[in-house]
């Protein structure tokens, strides 16, 4: 006589992924005005963002034609820092009526 004994099987719970929560992305948006030259915008983007002159020109052209351009998508904290740096960059020495820096806003990036 053969008695077969089967042990009950245990269902193991799958470990939940312990993924690092990502912060939602934010755009730094440069706003157009008539008091800053292309040279100013290009130099600012080179100094603050490390962009090459060619990319600076393309972004300057876009802000001039569309009124706004996204210059960076990053975390909210970093976006706020870059916005502050844009606001602190100072007036355009090539335009005498220029009273100060360009303006930028931050906004949640779609995604």
Image: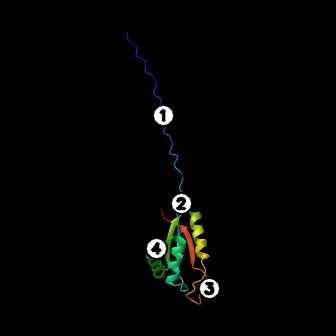
Of tags 3 and 2, the one toward the viewer is 3
Mark 1 to mark 4 CA distance (whole Å): 54 Å
Q: Looking at the picture, how far across and down is residue 87, in whole percent?
A: 60, 76
Apparent side of residue 3 relative to residue 96 in the rendered image (left or right): left
Of tags 1 and 4, the one toward the viewer is 4
Q: Looking at the picture, how far across and down is residue 7, in whole percent?
A: 45, 22
Mark 2 or mark 1, which has the lower sequence index? 1
Q: Element type at marker 4? A: loop
Mark 2 to mark 4 CA distance (whole Å): 27 Å
Mark 2 to mark 1 CA distance (whole Å): 33 Å
Q: Quadrant of residue 99?
A: bottom right
Crowdedness near tag 1: few (<14), some (14–19) or many (≥20) residues, C-alpha within 10 Å:
few
Residue beneath disc 3: 99
Crowdedness near tag 4: few (<14), some (14–19) or many (≥20) residues, C-alpha within 10 Å:
few
Q: Quadrant of residue 48?
A: bottom right
On residue 12, the disc is 1
Q: Element type at marker 2? A: loop
Q: Where the N terminus falls, by quadrant?
A: top left
Of tags 4 and 3, the one toward the viewer is 4
Q: Which residue is at the far left?
A: 1
Q: Element type at marker 3? A: loop
Q: Element type at marker 1? A: loop
Taking the spot 59% from the left edge, 63% from the top edge, the residue there is 77
On residue 52, the disc is 4
How many marks are shown on the rendered structure?
A: 4
Mark 4 to mark 3 CA distance (whole Å): 26 Å
Of tags 1 and 3, the one toward the viewer is 3
Mark 3 or mark 2, which has the lower sequence index? 2
Q: Looking at the picture, how far across and down is residue 46, in whole percent?
A: 51, 74
Mark 2 or mark 4, which has the lower sequence index? 2
On residue 24, the disc is 2
Mark 3 to mark 2 CA distance (whole Å): 34 Å
């Amino acid at each position: 006589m053969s008695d077969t004994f089967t042990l009950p099987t245990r269902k193991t719970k799958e470990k939940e992924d312990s993924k690092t929560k990502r912060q939602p992305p934010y755009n730094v948006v440069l706003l157009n005005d008539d008091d800053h030259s292309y040279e100013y915008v290009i130099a600012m983007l080179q100094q603050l963002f490390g962009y090459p002159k060619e990319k600076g020109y393309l972004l300057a052209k876009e802000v001039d034609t569309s009124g706004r351009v996204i210059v960076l998508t990053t975390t909210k904290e970093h976006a706020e820092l870059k916005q502050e740096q844009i606001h602190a960059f100072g007036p355009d020495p090539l335009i005498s009526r220029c009273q100060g820096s360009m303006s930028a806003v931050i906004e949640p990036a779609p995604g």
